[in-house]
Amino acid sequence: MTVRINDFALKIATVNGTGSASANALLMQAIFRMGVPVSGKNLFPSNIQGLPTWYEIRVSGDGYTARPAGIDLVVAMNPSTYPEDVAAVRPGGYLLYDDSWPLDPELLRDDITVLGAPFGRMCVEAFTGDRERTLLRNIVYAGAIAALIEMDMEVVDATLRATFGRKPKLLDANFRALRLGHDFARAELECPLPFRLAPMDATSRHILIDGNTAAALGCLYAGATVGAWYPITPATSLMESFRGFCERFRVDPKTGERRFCIVQAEDELAAAGVVVGANWAGARAFTPTAGPGISLMQEFIGLAYYTEVPAVFFDVQRAGPSTGMPTRTQQSDLLSLAYASHGDTKHIVLFPANPEECFHFAVQAFDLADRFQTPVFVASDLDIGMNDWMCPRLEWDDHYRPDRGKVLGPEELAGLERFYRYVDRDGDGVAPRTLPGVDPKGSYFVRGSGHDRYGAYTEDADAYRDVMDRLARKLASAGEAVPEPELRAAGNPELGIITVGGCRAAVLEALDRLRDQGISLDYLRVRGFPFGSVIHQFLESHERCFVVEQNRDSQLRTLLMAETGTPRDRMIPVVEYGGLPLAADFVVEQVTARLAEASV
Amino acid sequence: MTSIPKPSVRHPGLARNALGLTRRDYEGAMSTLCAGCGHDSITAALVQAFFELDLPPHRAVKLSGIGCSSKTTAYFLRQSHGFNAVHGRMPAVATGANAANRDLVAIGISGDGDSLSIGLGQFCHAIRRNVSLTYVLENNGVYGLTKGQFSASADVGSKSKRGEANPQRPIDPVLLALTLGASFVARSFSGDKAQLVPILKAGLRHRGFAFIDVISPCVTFNDHEGSTKSYRFTREHAHEVAPVDFVPIRSEIVVPVNGAEADTMDVSMHDGSVVRFRKVDAGYDPTDRGAAYAYVRARQEAGEVVTGLLYLEEGAPDMHEINRTVARPLAELPHSELCPGNATLQALLEEFR
């Protein structure tokens, strides 16, 4: 039997709210600390306690981090999902289940190996109290998995110690549970399995971090001082992380004074209003939200666009429409962000692919918002925002200075005969602004109603168009200021593949596999909107392009058609919108099938 | 929102305040409201209040929502930044502005449609947060710009211009503000400048949310027989219960604080200035929230509109005191005080390994 090293996937089925998250995190972290590239996807319900939840761990010595297609080992800890968990094992794979709750013989498959372990009974014997037994059952299965895939137990122990180091009593119980599972597996099960770990040195320059935490760090480092929000899955942890970082790094140790102000608003309308008011008054302010919040914020987004107030919005996208599936991922807000609010609007949107880009794009979002005096969206998603990703260690350039754009102070104002808010002095579409409280000469009146270049109310067609045309020029020029697309040329003028955001991992893996099949595609990943010249050129220079994205209606393709004029038939949609992170297999299958169709 | 610039004519004889500014320096553009609109009287009272407080105009910000009332922010303090927000959402913008720069003196102008219908939630939550904001509700019981629909403050039976009687119960913003814990609650009448100016001054000096409901008759759509927000009705039914004087900190306090004089009662503001309640009705205590609520409610049942500074609680922590925000405005903090730097980042990232 061939043995696969550092190339397999596990899926752990549990009940949410029972403490399995910490066991799964322990496994992830220990594999990472063995130097082996690893990624985890938490497939959880929109619920507090009692519903099925799954955690997928992919180990890939080659560094692939997209969602795995086939599961080699399913760990079934939740009897209510035994049928689908048995079905999830790839042929030739393994099922480990808690035989304290028997498996219906009808579910058995002859193409998989079934391993039973009495985790529940073991916990009843070893521990006291329902709570302890329930919690530690997770660590027991972690111990068994550690034995099955040959984890370095010194690393696992150290990881456990780091987790519970400050709570010695908990640590002791957790160690006992870990050994219980581990020793059982070693004694009773065939260990190790034919797929297993071997230490590597591929993670020493990396970290495991989720995108919301990374984005929060970006806000901290960009100098954001005001955060306004209304809690919403999957964006909540962004503001909670920001608060946590501020409490560590922005509180005066002597006085307790805080260099930040976080407003938990009554709704997303208010959160957007707070952000607009704070930016207008000179702070860097932001709000994290998801699709339903974006819907509620439309009014203020239009106001900020038309009155030219900087504002930063993080949209951690989830499956829509309406409430949709709050704990499932999607990229289905692309169109509603690009043209948010009524009337003629267009907005800067940044599309991070991973936590590293969440960090850097957060900083860029504030710079772009200040520079262009307009709303800027960072379009993340649940998969990027809430799952732990292995990514290169974040680096901060201490020479960074915020780009606050054109803000006139008393000295600049003194040189002007009169200040008018919307006069484009430099011909770049951006009119200098002033901040309240600084100088009486700089006062102006913000109005969402029709205004001329002097900031005065108008219903005059020419004066109105004058401002609207400048706004269009301003936004068009932003296309060259947003992050440039990521390009990988395979030298194929016929075929390209275009994607966005978190699809990156699956598409790049798919490209490697397609190349092995003799199919080479030039690759472009959109990282910003409005689209810059590189995107226009890529579309012009390729006969046809696949457009891979996670929504039903090919929204990126629609945007590309609308903004570049590329004909519909030159862009082939490849869409996955079921709410789970994209897998490379899907992309490979779609591309090869479409190419086969075309050649028939 | 239409506005016409006001020519600045200098009158050498005009009185000057401590900053050397005249009332004219606190004015704005010409009003485009209907002649006789109560809102214009409130604008004039605001000009006087700012003038008398010697506030540098550029240190103030004026914010509003949408509606006739919200247009008036263009008609005073032309040297202040103004923000005409979206309908009913001024409190959120004011919260943000105050979060960013706590040194700005924020005045919010709203109307009964803006505050009690489309923006009711925002109004309530600004009170809850105790944002430092003087919030003036120019209350006329009617939608003017859309030509005469009842608002949520119209009394049951109040008649529209076409003669229909309003069937729905009103929302009383004073009772609401008292219930929600507002630290400064007043009601006045646009036609009573002598009462309104000291209330506005006290509100502007109050730290926290100062709510001032001002009955402000709409001469075009709601100033007729049968309207309960008309000049005549208000004049006949207003009952001043808690008249005040505002004594700024720099003035010599001739009457000892805490009421040596029988018919006054003094409340000290956070900055040392004093609000002096005159001839307070027997049994009315403007520092007792429950009593204030019961009194306003009882007089209302009797068909009276109680006016004056009805409730005042000095010392309630405002949004920044609750947050323990640094004294210096957040908008003025240099990046070096906000960014922990790369060395700290690298140390922090060890936790992500």
Image (tube, coloured by chain):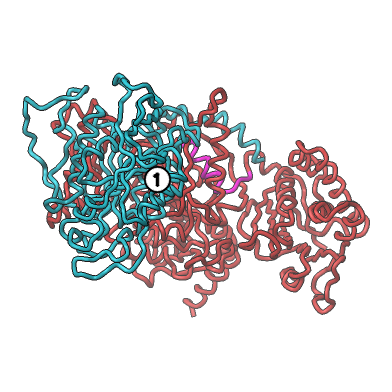
Relative to residue B18, is residue A501 drawn left or right?
A: right
Reading the image, the residue beneath label 1 is A275
Describe the element under mark 1 as helix, strand or loop. helix
**In the displayed structure, would residue B343 be above or below residue A358?**
above
Chain A: its colour in the image is: red
Crowding near the residue tagged with mark 1, few <14, some 14–19, many ≥20 C-alpha atoms within 10 Å: many
Q: Does residue A110 appear to the left or right of B122 in the view shown? A: right
Residue drawn at x 87%, y 65% is: A100
Which quarter of the rendered picture does the N terminus of chain A lie within?
bottom right
The answer to whether residue B229 is left or right of residue A198 is left
Q: Main secondary structure of the magenta part?
A: helix
Hue used for the chain lettered B: cyan
Residue A504 magenta-drawn?
A: no
> Which of the two residues, A93 or B133, is positioned nearer the viewer here?
B133
Q: Chain of mark 1?
A: A
Q: Position of residue B159 (x, y in %)?
A: 24, 66
Q: Based on the displayed image, in which of its 4 quarters is residue B6 positioned?
A: top left
Nearer-the-camera pick, A237 or A368: A237
